């Protein structure tokens, strides 16, 4: 069972270059929609060990949020082979997120 990684600028490169497809959830503790998204992201991490799933707190990691031009949260980013293949803001149903990863 994989758990969600807390991603920050110190471990970001190793997450990005893990060789696996990466799902990043940009969030903030005060954000209502982020709190709704969080259990869905947790579930994906637990059920899909083939992916690396990380959460990035935009208040603590402003540099990473800027790097990804995150304007709205929650924002989900999918990275494959070190390249961003998808980035979108707002709440997404689990199936839609899984299809982006697949």
Image (spheres, rainbow, N blue to C red):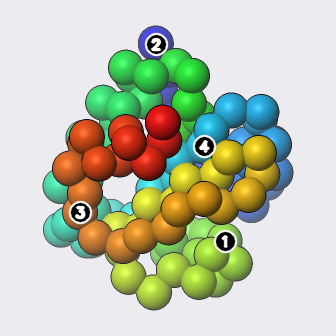
| Residue 34: image location, x then y, percent | 27, 62
Q: Between marks 3 and 1, how big is the CA–CA gap?
A: 20 Å
Q: Mark 1 points at which residue?
A: 64
Secondary-structure class at tag 4: strand
Q: How crowded is mark 2: few (under 14 residues within 10 Å), some or many (20 or more)?
A: few
Q: Which of marks 1 and 4 is nearer the N terminus?
A: 4
Q: Mark 3 points at which residue?
A: 91
Q: Is residue 73 left or right of residue 94?
A: right
Q: Which of marks 2 and 1 is nearer the N terminus?
A: 2
**Mark sitting on residue 1:** 2
Which of the two discs, 3 and 1, sits closer to the camera? 3
| Residue 65: image location, x then y, percent | 59, 76
CB within 8 Å, label 1 to label 4 = no
Q: Is residue 51 left or right of residue 30?
A: right
Q: How crowded is mark 4: few (under 14 residues within 10 Å), some or many (20 or more)?
A: many
**Mark sitting on residue 22:** 4
């Amino acid at each position: 069972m994989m758990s969600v990684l807390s991603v920050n600028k110190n471990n970001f490169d190793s997450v990005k270059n893990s060789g696996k497809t990466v799902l990043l959830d940009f969030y903030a503790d005060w954000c209502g929609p982020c709190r709704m998204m969080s259990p869905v992201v947790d579930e994906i991490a637990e059920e899909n060990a083939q992916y690396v799933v990380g959460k990035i707190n935009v208040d603590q990691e402003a540099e990473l949020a800027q790097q990804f031009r995150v304007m709205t949260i929650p924002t989900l980013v999918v990275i494959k082979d070190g390249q961003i293949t998808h980035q979108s803001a707002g709440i997404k149903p689990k199936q839609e997120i899984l299809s982006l990863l697949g």
